[in-house]
Amino acid sequence: MIYKDFKGMKLSQLGMGSMRLPVIGGDDSKIDESAAMEMVDYAIRNGINYFDTAWGYHGGNSETVMGKALSRYPRESFYLASKFPGYDLSNMDKVEEIFEKTEVKISVKTRIGRDEPDEFYKLMKLYNKYPLEELIVHPRTQKDFYRNTPNLSMFGYAVEQSRFPLCYNGDVKKREDKENIVETFPGISAIMLGRGVIANPFLTASFEKPEEQNEIDKDTLRNFHDALYEGYGQVSDGILPVLFKMKEIWTYMKELFPEDKKRIKKLKKAENAKDYEQAVAELFALL
């Protein structure tokens, strides 16, 4: 496992999220606790020490199950992040309770509103009332999802108004995107990567070595894919959950294969391991 230093913490470069834990009977609110604990055990055995959950995942049950799973390990051996949809103003009455009951440092990741960007003016006033460790802003509304472009004007407002360190999140897909954000907002504390690093596993390498061309290394990319495929197979019940997860990753990673829409479509239609593996082999043969 590769580890990165972040604000005095040594975090595994690969973390485990808990928005899509195994469930019972197709009910998203009924987590299969035994299977989830096996996943956590596998992650820790393989060096992962960063875990992510949220108040709203699995009908409010993700935090509880992840707490049970991780409580079996020494508290100093892992890092746990959680969050709640602060962009929805109807949730703000819960904030006081959270700050009263917790002894840990709290960071907030937010969008600029639920429906309209102007909601962010009220949100910033609310966030500034609390002793946040960091505010992470994705400058889109919830309604936008990932459509449109990030509202950099509203992020600039956050830079002007925030009382605490500010992190940018949103559409950093290549080195030039990161450089543009840093140049435009030099005072921010960090940039959070999301879909961009799934679409291009070489993204962070291009940050560290800007003098080199960010070319696709076929063998490294294939090893990355195969490690995910094999790992999901070890913790999943059957091939269908594995294919579901891999196809979701290909939703982003297909950007590395812009000329191969026909083969990507074949991959997405695969319903068994043989067809999926054949489609993947054909894609990589073209690199």
Image (cartoon, grey):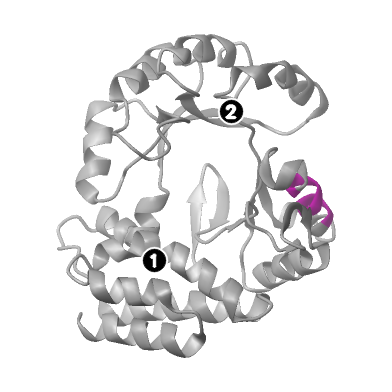
| 194 vs 265, nearest the viewer | 265
Query: Where's the C terminus, which quadrant?
Result: bottom left
Spot occupied by residue 59 in the image (x, y as percentages of width and height) = 73, 43
Quadrant for residue 258, please give it. Answer: bottom left
Instruction: Look at the picture and state if 233 lies above or below 72.
Output: below
Spot occupied by residue 123 in the image (x, y as percentages of width and height) = 53, 15
**Residue 65 part of the magenta segment:** yes
Mark carried by residue 15: none
**Is residue 6 in sight in this rendering?**
yes
Instruction: Look at the picture and state if 30 lies above or below 286.
Output: above
Q: Which residues are magenta?
A: 62-68
The residue indicated by pointer 1 is 250
Badge 2: residue crowd in 10 Å (few <14, some 14–19, many ≥20): some
The residue indicated by pointer 2 is 133
Left or right: 247, with 152 as reference point: right
Q: Secondary structure at mark 1?
A: helix
Q: Amino acid at mark 1?
A: Trp
Give how far apart the Cα atoms at labels 1 and 2 are: 34 Å
Point out the tag, 1 or 2, that comes first from the N-terminus. 2
Quadrant for residue 40, please give it. Answer: bottom right
Q: Amino acid at mark 2?
A: Glu
Spot occupied by residue 182 in the image (x, y as percentages of width and height) = 27, 34
**Is residue 201 in sight in this rendering?**
no
Residue at figure coordinates x 73%, y 34% from the top left: 104
Badge 1: residue crowd in 10 Å (few <14, some 14–19, many ≥20): some
| 177 vs 287, nearest the viewer | 287
Q: Secondary structure at mark 2?
A: loop
Residue at figure coordinates x 53%, y 68% from the top left: 244
